[in-house]
Image: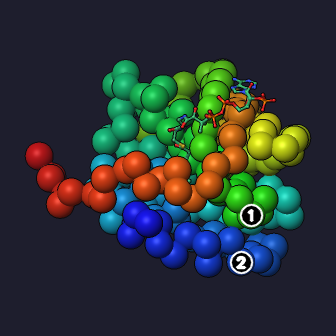
Amino acid sequence: MNSILGNWAEKFRPHPDGTQLPPHHGHCLGCGPDNPHGHHLVVQRRGEEVHAVHRFSERHMGAPGIAHGGAVATVLDDLFGFLLYLTGTPAVTRQLEVRYDAPVILGTSYELAARVVRDDGRKLFVEAEMSEVGGTTVATASALFLKVDIAHFDRGAPPAPVDLD
Ligand SMILES: CCCCCCCCCC(=O)SCCNC(=O)CCNC(=O)[C@H](O)C(C)(C)COP(=O)(O)OP(=O)(O)OC[C@H]1O[C@@H](n2cnc3c(N)ncnc32)[C@H](O)[C@@H]1OP(=O)(O)O
């Protein structure tokens, strides 16, 4: 078992509504607090949805002052990964589609919400949106996650020491 995911099973314990969900692991690009290049996404359960408020920083710039589309996709994909705490099974992204409706401005707070729209055998169909606080939607995403055994993650090498260059 990959040691970084060694405690993954315990993370599937029931998470009461309104509580903050644990990061996937410390080095996760989306939510890991120990990844200096990451987004440090903080996610809560709200009913059968997961929610976050997020600001992109200069580390995630595409056009000047605007978040890179890949960075936006990363955050949406990682947010989907928090739905696994509600479904109770490991799964991975098989297909991800993002619609970019408006530029995502660095340093501006955005609200994100995601939910499972269909749980069909191994397949989890999920959708999410990112909006200005109390306002206009700037991106929507849909994805297919496929449930996998935790052994799927044994293929990954343990994280190397962090290189800040
Ligand atoms: C511990 C958890 C940590 C979670 C962290 C979350 C972080 C955020 C999410 C991620 O970043 S995940 C990382 C990015 N994703 C990957 O690395 C996945 C790479 N892909 C794979 O490893 C394999 O493709 C995968 C395990 C997902 C699937 O391979 P399989 O051989 O097991 O499945 P297969 O391709 O046969 O498809 C299974 C079913 O899904 C169906 N399917 C596949 N692609 C589809 C598609 N695009 N649309 C509709 N159906 C599709 C396929 O037809 C089939 O249907 P049936 O069972 O009915 O025959």
For badge 1, the amino acid type reads: Gly
Q: Which quadrant would residue 96 be assigned to in this image?
A: top right
- Looking at the rendered image, the quarter that the N terminus falls into is bottom left
Dot 2 surroundings within 10 Å: few (below 14), some, or many (20 or more)? few
Mark 1 or mark 2, earlier in chain: 2
Left or right? Give the position of 5 relative to 43: left
Residue at the disc numbered 1: 88
For badge 2, the amino acid type reads: Arg
Percent coordinates x, y for residue 62 in the rendering: 37, 25
Residue at the disc numbered 2: 13
Left or right? Give the position of 160 relative to 72: left
Q: Nearer the viewer, residue 82 or 110?
A: 82
Percent coordinates x, y for residue 108 in the rendering: 51, 44
Whether residue 124 appears in this view of the structure is no
What is the C-alpha distance between the residues marked 1 and 2? 8 Å
Percent coordinates x, y for residue 37 in the rendering: 31, 49
Dot 1 surroundings within 10 Å: few (below 14), some, or many (20 or more)? few
Left or right? Give the position of 63 relative to 150: left
Question: In the rendered view, how is the structure colored?
Answer: rainbow
Q: Nearer the viewer, residue 18 or 123?
A: 123
Percent coordinates x, y for residue 8 in the rendering: 55, 70
Q: Which quadrant would residue 60 be assigned to in this image?
A: top left
Secondary element at image label 1: loop
Q: Residue drawn 86% across and 64% down?
A: 47
Q: Nearer the viewer, residue 107 or 87?
A: 87
Q: Nearer the viewer, residue 99 or 80?
A: 80
Above or below, 62 relative to 39:
above
